[in-house]
Structures are given as structure tokens and as C-alpha cells.
Amino acid sequence: MKLNFSNLMLAAAVCLSANAYAADGGKTGKVKPTPPRKFIDPANIDPSVKPGDDFFEYANGGWLKSNTIPAKETRWGSFNILNDDNKKKLQAIVQEVSKTSATAPKGSIKQRVGDMYASAMDTMAIEKRGYDPIKADLKRIDAIADINGVVNEIVYERANAIGSPLFSFGIRQDPKNVSKYVVGLGQGGTSLPDRDYYLKSDPRTKRIQDAYKQYIVDLYTLTGSSAEVAAKNAATIFALETKLAEAQMTRVAMRDPNKTYNKFAIADLSKTTPHLNWAQLLPKLKVNGQDTVLVSSPSFLTAADGLLASTPVEDWKTYLKWGILRGSAGSLSSPFVQSQFKFSSVLSGQQVQAPRYERMTSLVDGSLGELLGQLYVEKYFTPQAKASMLALVNNLKSTLGDRIKRLEWMTPETKQRALRKLNAFTVKIGYTDKWETYAGLTVDRSDYFGNLRRVSTWSYNDMVGRLGKPVDKTEWGMTPPTVNAYYNPVNNEIVFPAGILQFPFYDFKADDAVNYGGIGAVIGHEMTHGFDDQGRQYDADGTLRDWWKKDDADKFKSRADMVVNQFNNFVAVDTMHVNGKLTLGENLADLGGINIAYEAFKKTKQGQSNTKIDGFTPDQRFFLSYAQVWRGLQRPEALALQVQTDPHSPGQFRTNAPITNVDAWYKAFNVQPGDKMYKKPEDRIRIW
């Protein structure tokens, strides 16, 4: 349940405190200090648009007209710019440590971070190896003779962190017994981002399907197959994955935590999947001592088992080889990398690939995030920032408590349980208190592909090694530089990495209106996730347990349905509407977030004044700050992909929809009947 700043790639400008040359070109040797930042810059506004007609365009139109999406990006806006700045900071760190990592003590932070980056940038060695790193995998698959060999390969790839064919597998907290880890099994086995990419036949989907088949042909051709064989393989793979897609639950159905909670005794599960004997397979997956497993989609496992029996072994071998090719393409020589980008660009609209140093910096963050993260926070995050953020969180937490107490639609009994859950929130800010050491993980400066495999193997072993141990609630799901935030229902925690604690979300020098409209709304968003349509089903200790009186739950659902209907009416691109059910949790969190943040802001000195800054009242600055967080441009391909797969609505709707339900916005901008965004007071949606 993330605010999804990384997935949406919606980010913001961080101006460096560099000085600019004087007007005489620097001939005098003097420099002129950079003028103070305008936290709400009038130049970014389009005054020709009425705030009540399209607030997103009004607040951001000047910026939108003067900016374009860089060729290497699929979106460009507040989140991207901040994310880009963070990448530059990380890039400077990895480049610096890679210069001396060869002589650093083995196993040290700088040795492993520096050597990982150095190995990733050793393109001469990578080009020379071609696809040698996966030849042993392909040869092993060639030797498969029967269905047992297929099943053994599926398990082997999983246990050795090589691939993830056919089904999903992982270790997670048991939502109904949160102090214990449990084995989780579920649907998987497909390559495209969503089941509908296999099942629909509209022109946009057909274009993606054709590009995907060509991608398969390209990779098989690069590994020596003839054009004819490669084309046949593409047809085989697409047909098999289509059958798997047909068996998968929809994204909307998967949002129901009770529907996806199906606990089986291992012997009972095996009876439903006769070709997958879990009592034999789990030890091969390094899982021992377990008598039950959780299955998110039992019908999928049954269907997948049926496919094992009805599909020729040769087709499975083709499918398994494809998994190796697809999973490794981005880490092999340039023809493979280029083929991967060629296909991904059809999905996203990205015009050129990001520079390798940028991609490899992100790779280091993704693979050794808590080693690189230590170097990042040492340089860029201060204890003062953490303390200031904690004060903001406490203000918003108190405010949400006040709002719950005043709810007219909820009974006192359910209110008390809601307050108990709110008071039990764990708050994590900046970075972890207990860094992961990646004990035993070796990084070799001269072995890029081997490093990736070792990282994957270490991660897999670390995951399965949790079984039987106490749940570690100190863990973080994001690295410190991440421009994002999240709520974790089974730990009932809200988490804010250091990366997001920068402008436009937060700035020490900004006025309260800007900070509450930015990071305040983020904090309120994550808090509200604890009470959205999914989060509300988890109790104060994180247990999936119904703590609602039925009448209260019915009233909540009726209000949530109003949010579904509001978003269903938005057209994002072409004829594609936002999916109100898929995006419900995030839309509820946005609505709660802005209401909580505004009420908390009104407790501040500025919030109780009418003093204008740069021509805007405090309330106007609050809403403008909220809007500029979501400022951005997006390619139509990326927008279509988001609408189909992402539980977050596009930024313009995340700006406009919530504020139409906030009375203070109408007053701040004199929004009247007849304005396009106007809603009658009785039609405004009020939940948290």
C-alpha cells in the first residue's frame, strides 16, 4: 500500500544550493547568491484557467506549457525531477567508491558497493561474454525428458534464484497470525504486465502482443535459433502464457485480502495438484518443517497443474528457456539489452534508453540498498530532518484521531477500535535503525552477471531462512534514497524514506502551508491507508480480523462506492477510463490525506492567519502545494499502462478529485456553481 511515487515516477525539483555568476559574467570575481526559492512559483500557474474549472491546469499549467518529457523518460514532473536528483547523488557516491573499492577491505561496504558498480560498468567484459552466462541454463533445460523433469526445473530455478516460472512463491507474515512467517503460493507464470494483455484484442493491445512476440523471436534468434524456429517458439509461448492468464484472478479481485487468504494443509493442497506434490517440492525449495501454506488463488494452481499434464514437454522446455532469456536479457551483451528496450518502449513510450551509468546506479540501489543507503544518509540526511518529520507525524496523527471522534456515521464502539488502531501505528522515518549487512554475500569486481546471481541467491536464502524465526519488524521495504512512502498493514506501520523528505514535499525553509500541502498530505495518505477498503480489514496489531460493527462497515462501503463512481467517470487516455475499483485504496488515501493535512495545518500559526505570500493566502498556498506535488507530463503509452495495471490514478485526477470534496478549497478559490469542478455540499464525499 504505497503512495507510489516510484511506480508512477511522478517526482519534484530539488534546487542545489550552488551560487550563480554575477551579471558581469564573473569578471569581478564576485558571485551573486541564488535568490530564495519561490515555494509556490506564480510562473508555474496558468491564470487563464479558472481554479474551479480545472485546478490541476490552473496550478500547473505554466509549468506544463514550458516543459517537455526527456527522451529517456516516460513521465516528467515533480516526482521525476526529485528522483533524478537523488540518482545524481547516488551516482556520485558509487562512482567515487568504485575508484578505490578494489583496495578496500573485502566485505566492507565500500568494497561491495564500489565493485558492484564497477562490474556493471565493465562493458568490455560484458560484451565479450555475450550470452555465455546463461548457456549452462539453456543446456540443462535441453536435457529435460518428461513432465517430472519440467517440474524439477521449475523448482530448481526457484531455489537457485534463477527464475520464477509457472507460479509465485514467497515467505511472508501470516495475516491472521502476524507473529509468524508462512509460505505463500499464488498465480504467476506470465510475462506481460497484466492478464488482459493476453485476453483483449483492441488495437493498442494487439500492437503490444505483436511487439512481445517479436521480442521472443529476437532473443531466440540471438541465441542461435533460425527465424522459423524462433517464430514457432513465440507462438508456443504466447499460447501457453495465454492459458495461464485465463486462469489468473483479476487485479481487482486480488485486492480482497480475505479472498486471497486460503490456508491449506500441504497434503490437502497436493490433492488438488496431482503433478505438484508439495510435500516433495517444498524441501527442494529449501522449505522445511512447515505443515501448512497460504494460497492466494487455489483455482490458478489447479489450472496450472492441469496444463502440466496437457501441454507437451517440448512446449514446456521452450517456455522455460524463454524465462531464462527474458530474465537475463538486460544483464547480457548489448544486442540483448537493446532487444529488451525495444519491447519495453512499446509498453511505455520511452524514446531512448537511460544512460548505462544511470541504470547501473539504480541497480546497485536495488541490489545492495542498505549498504549504499548508509553512504547516502551519512551525506544527505540529518537528525534534524528526522525530528522535524516526527513532529509533523504526531500533529497529523492527533488530527486524524480528532476527526475519527467526530465522525457522524460511525458508532462509538467502532470509533474506539479505530482509535486503538491509530494509536498503535509504528512510524519509521528516514532509514532503518538496524542495517542489513548482507552477511556472506561476495561481490566480485570482474563478474557482473555472477554478482547478480549471488545477490539473487542471497536474497532467496535470506527469505526462506526466516521460517521458524520471530518476525523482524525493524525491516524496511524501501531503501533510504527512495522517493516514496508506504503503509504496511500486517505491521500497522507508516514508513517515510529519506528520499521523499525534500522539496516539493518538505523543506526546512518553506512555510507551513507548503509543507502541510506536500509532506503533510503524504503522511495523511499513509495513515488513511490503515483505514481504506483494504487496510480497514486489519486490526491494531496487523491481524486480518473484522473489528467493525456491520452497520458501520455498510456505511463505509456506501461512501467508498461514491469514490469508485467518481473515478470511473475520468477518461485517462483515448477511451480508457480510470478503474475506480482498482484505484479505490489509493483514492481513499488521497481523500483522507488532504483532509487530515488541511485540518492539521489550521492548527499552525500560519494556518490561523490570512497573511499572503507572493499574492496567495495561506489556504491557497496549501492547495497549490498539494497540486504541484502531482505536476507532470506523461506519454500516452505509459498512461495506458498505468490505467491498466497500477492501483494509483493519474496525477491530474489525484489533484482534482479529492479537493472537490473539501469545503475549504471552494472557499479558498471562490469556486461557485457553474464552475466545472463544482459539487453541491451534499454531494461531497466525506469519509475520514
Image (cartoon, rainbow, N blue to C red):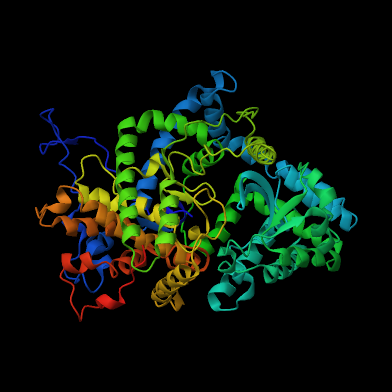
Front in this rendered view, residue 469 or 191: 469
Residue sitting at 27 percent across and 38 percent down?
A: 16
Horizontal side, residue 19 vs residue 531: left or right: left
Figure disc tally: 0
Residue 426, horizontal then vertical, whole percent: 45, 43
Q: Quadrant of the C terminus?
A: bottom left
Instruction: Note whether 329 is above or below 432 in the view shown.
Output: below
Residue 284, horizontal then vertical, whole percent: 81, 44
Residue sitting at 23 percent across and 52 percent down?
A: 601
Horizontal side, residue 686 vs residue 267: left or right: left
Residue sitting at 20 percent across and 34 percent down?
A: 19
**Residue with the most extreme right position:** 145
Front in this rendered view, residue 543 or 614: 543
Front in this rendered view, residue 578 or 420: 420
Horizontal side, residue 567 vs residue 250: left or right: left
**Residue with the most extreme front position:** 413
Horizontal side, residue 89 vs residue 518: left or right: right
Residue 27, horizontal then vertical, whole percent: 12, 31
Instruction: Note whether 644 is above or below 152 in the view shown.
Output: below
Residue 167, horizontal then vertical, whole percent: 71, 57
Front in this rendered view, residue 595 or 331: 595
Using the rendered image of the protein, determine whether residue 260 is visible from the camera's viewpoint.
Answer: yes
